[in-house]
Image: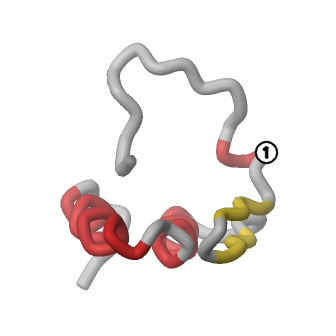
Amino acid sequence: MPILTPGAAVTTTRAHVHYVVTEYGTAMLLGRSLAERARSLIAIAAPQFREPLERAAYDLHLLYR
């Protein structure tokens, strides 16, 4: 999901997350910018969601062309 639904609970901040692991890979997020984090997370998303997530990241101005 590119963003959380309004009212969704967040139990940890992005500064606390160092690694995210999925069946498609591992993303090391520690010390990375928002754009770098977005690209890393998109890269380990399920293949059918990568393009919509990338589009959403551009729409949210996390990534630039």
Q: How is the image coloured?
A: secondary structure
Q: Nearer the viewer, residue 20 or 24?
A: 24
Residue 27 lies, with reference to residue 62, above or below; the image says: below
- In the rendered image, residue 20, in percent from the top left (x then y), is placed at 71, 60
- In the rendered image, residue 47, in percent from the top left (x then y), is placed at 40, 75
Q: Residue at x 22, y 68 (%)?
A: 55
Which quarter of the picture shows residue 10? top right
Q: Residue at x 49, y 67 (%)?
A: 45
Q: Residue furthest bottom?
A: 65
- In the rendered image, residue 50, in percent from the top left (x then y), is placed at 36, 72
Q: Amino acid at mark 1?
A: His
Drawn side of residue 21 relative to residue 41, left or right: right
Q: How many marks?
A: 1
Residue 29 lies, with reference to residue 14, above or below; the image says: below
Drawn side of residue 41 relative to residue 51, left or right: right
Residue of label 1 = 16
Drawn side of residue 52 relative to residue 49, left or right: left
Q: Residue at x 24, y 85 (%)?
A: 65
For label 1, the crowd category at 10 Å Cα-Cα, with few meaning under 14, some 14 to 19 and many 20 or more, is few
Helix, strand or loop at label 1? It is helix
Q: Nearer the viewer, residue 39 or 25?
A: 25
Residue 58 lies, with reference to residue 18, above or below; the image says: below
Q: Residue at x 52, y 63 (%)?
A: 34
Q: Nearer the viewer, residue 63 or 22?
A: 22
- In the rendered image, residue 15, in percent from the top left (x then y), is placed at 73, 47
